[in-house]
Amino acid sequence: MRKEVVVAAAAVTVGAAAVGMAVFLKHWKQQRERRLRQAKRILRKFANDCATPVAKLWNIADDLASKMESGLSSEESMLGMLVSYVAPLPTGEEKGIYYGINLRGTNFLMIRGSLGGKNLPISELQREEVAIPSTAMDGDSTKELFDLIAVELAKFISVHSEIDGKAESRERKLGFTVSFPVEEDARSSGTAIKWRSLSVNDIVGKELTNDINRALEKHGIDLWVFALANDTTGDLAGAIYYSKENVASITLGMGTDVGYVESAEQVPKWHGQSPNSGEMIINMQWGNFSSSHLSFTEFDASLDAESSNPGSRMFEKLISGMYLGEIVRRVLLKMAQETALFGEWVPPKLATPYLLRSPDMAAMHQDTSEDFEVVDEKLKEIFEINYSTPMAREIVAEVCDVVAERGARLVGAGIVGIVKKLGRIANKKSVVTIEGGLYEHYRVFRNYLHSSVWEVLGNDHSDNVIIENCHGGSGAGSIFLAASQTYNAGS
Ligand code: ADP
Ligand code: MG
């Protein structure tokens, strides 16, 4: 009897618990669905704000083209539009072994290669990267840095001199290119600021060239630097070596930059000697482009406001490798805070700026596994988010898609703007080369970029613009600058 009562009571308790559990589960499920809907709402709004229909891309292209034009007569252009090279451009006839230096923010690349004319790729390419101690980049003096470069270069040359044989010549030039540092720590160093804008008639550039040559001489190196150029100028020289249809080179890595070929008579602000070819290379700092047609979301605005250079390099902040992952992180943080996308607690690491880098973003974006296993792995690895639902992961991948698609399509609009400025859309073939890790390694980004150019130009004109990867990889442009200078100076 007693036993039965106990059993009955237990049954009631279990029953009540089960009912309670069911209610709880139902409630929990509803809440989860509500939150997921909220997250999706944020995603939809963000995607909407980032939309880049063709009409908008045309507006951006037109605006860039007109700002390029006005920048060629003004010293104050947001695009810089610096005359960065007036020496003869390579012809594709230059042959032989050449050396180059590509100075980056925190390291420099020594490079050597053999050119065999425009029908052959660069061969015997050797490259060696040397880290620059931070003390060498601090302050105003470049003496320590140039001594380091000279010492390392002497070693590099001696290693390869046997292969070079007797090709050595007193006339030989060394191509020297400088990459713009975008890393936060390199950006503020005295040297980086000095080298931010290299133009041919710039006194700072000339002094630096003299300093480098003095260091080379002191260390007994039989090469000399003709002029400093930024690396995009070098890339373009390399592209022109292979084909005269190459009109522009774009750097698309951490940061972004453009070099393009302009006819000298289109450059009213140039008062120097006119180059024989009638053409010069203009460095356009399109990372600094801004336009009322670019729409900035709340995430872009906060990224900019909290950056080390608020209000500047707005285009770069939408398209370059340094920022894409950071935009994604900001969107995910908002979702975590407002919709508990990753659980009740906002994962603390999600609040750390610049923790998400574009290679990881690309990996999540390009995850084709059914349950987004790569996303899951990356969330664990980067943000210590140990549990995420497949739905949440899918949203993460979609945020990456929106950010990458917008960035890539804006680059496409920029390319159309350049070709338009040159008046080549309708009737001439133009090749644009792109160098940089973002373009080379982020497949979906690259596809979006290509298809946006086709879409904007339409069937009639899309065949006129060809986009290619640059020759020889990062830094190789210095070799082509060396080649064109040596060859032309000697002839
Ligand atoms: P930079 O010369 O500007 O430092 P690189 O041209 O070497 O840059 O490219 C490096 C940048 O390219 C990285 O900062 C990153 O943003 C991007 N990147 C490299 N690999 C990938 C990848 N697999 N997916 C997406 N982006 C990548
Ligand atoms: Mg690079």
Image: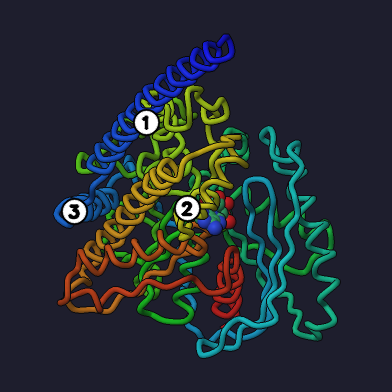
The image shows residue 340 at horizontal and vertical percentages of 42, 27
Q: CA distance from mark 2 to mark 3?
A: 31 Å
User: In the rendered image, which residue does mark 3 sit on?
Assistant: 53
Across the whole image, how many numbered discs are drawn on residues?
3
Q: Which mark is residue 371?
A: 2
Task: Of the two numbered discs 2 and 3 on the same chain, state the one appearing first in sequence.
Answer: 3
Q: Secondary structure at mark 2?
A: loop
Instruction: Residue 409: tell me if it is visible.
Output: yes
Q: CA distance from mark 3 to mark 1?
A: 37 Å
Give the residue drawn at x 34%, y 53%. 405
The image shows residue 117 at horizontal and vertical percentages of 55, 88
User: In the rendered image, which residue does mark 1 sit on?
Assistant: 29
How crowded pointer 1 is (Cα within 10 Å; few <14, some 14-19, many 20+) is rated as few
Type of the residue with mark 2: Asp
Type of the residue with mark 3: Pro
Give residue 96's quadrant in the image: bottom right
Q: Which mark is residue 263?
A: none
